[in-house]
Image (spheres, rainbow, N blue to C red):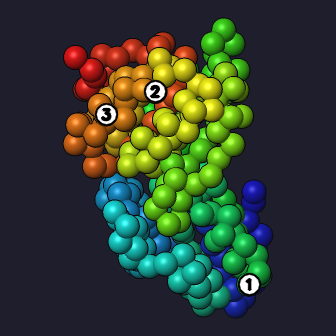
Amino acid sequence: MSACQPNKTTGRASLVGAGPGAPDLLTLRAVKALQSADVVLFDALIDPSILDLAPEHARRIDVGKRCGRHAMNQAAINRLIVQHAQQGAHVVRLKGGDPFVFGRGGEELDSLRLAGVPVEVVPGVTAACAAAASLQLPLTHRDVARSVHFVTGHGSDGTLPGHDWRALALSGGTIAAYMAGRTLPSVAANLMQAGMVGSTPAVAVENASRPDERCAYGTLATLPGILAASGFDGPTLVLIGAVVGLAQSDIVPVLQAA
C-alpha cells in the first residue's frame, strides 16, 4: 500500500517488516523507509546493523517484548507512533518478520487510520518462509501438501489459543506454529486428538535465519519431548506435515531422537 503525502502539520508512518533476523533478508523498500526515518520504534531481537540504516539524527526507541516482559504495552506503542507522526516525523515501526503475520500490525494500522496519519506497510520475510528456506523444505508441494496454515502457539495470556484442531488435522497441509516452543505439548496433543497421526514429521526451528539457528527433528508425538530436552530459549517456530520429510537436515545444526 502506498503512503499518502503528508500535509504541513502531519508526518507519516511506515510499518516495516524487518524479516526473521538476518540483515540481508531486509527488503530494498524497508531500507529506503529506514533511511528517511526520524523516529524508529523497534522490536526485540532486531539486528543492530539494521538500526544503523536509519539516519544518525533518528531517535531509536526500544518497544520490544522479551520473555513475557513487555517494554511497552501495545496501546502505548500505538499512541507513541501517532504522537510522533502528528508532530511531523516520519515514524518507522520496525517489526520482526512481517507486520501482518502475528505482528500486531493491524492494531497499529487501525490507530494510525483513526488518527488520520498517512501510513504505508512494508512487508517482510516471515519466520516460516525463512525456516523453510534454511532447511530446503518446501512449505507446499503439489505431491505432498497443497496448503499451508499459519497458527499462533502463544496467546495474549501466554496459553495456547483455541484453534479448529480438526480442520487443521484433516487439511493434509503444512502447519506452521509460531511461538510454539512452550506450548508444543498442547499443540501436539490437540492435533493427535483431532485425528492427525503421531508419526507425522515435525521440526522445531530456533532463531530462524540467524547465525545461531538450530533445529530439532522428530514426529508430532516425539518432538515435544525432544524440544523440552534441547534447551531452546530463542524464538521457536514449529513446522508440522509431510513436507518436513523433504528437508535437507544437514543444512543447520540438528538435534533429533537417538
Name the residue rendered at 75%, 59% in the picture.
2
Residue, far top: 143
Label 1 to label 3: alpha-carbon separation = 48 Å
Callout 2 amino acid: Leu
Q: Say which element carries label 1.
A: helix
- Are the residues tagged 3 and 2 within 8 Å (C-beta)? no
Given residues 74 and 61, the one toward you in this image is: 74
Name the residue rendered at 50%, 37% in the picture.
189
Return the residue at label 2. Answer: 220
Nearer-N-terminus badge (1/3):
1
Callout 3 amino acid: Gly
Up-down relation of residue 183 to residue 215 (above or below): below
Given residues 119 and 197, the one toward you in this image is: 197
Return the residue at label 3. Answer: 225
Answer with left or right where residue 218 lies relative to residue 255: right
**Viewer-nearest of labels 1 and 3?**
3
Question: Which x, y percent locates residue 188?
Answer: 48, 35
Q: Say which element carries label 3.
A: helix
Query: Would residue 6 be visible to someone looking at this image?
Result: no
Return the residue at label 1. Answer: 115
Mark 2 nearby-residue class (10 Å; few <14, some 14–19, many ≥20): many
**Quadrant housing residue 190:** top right
Answer with left or right where residue 112 lies relative to residue 213: right
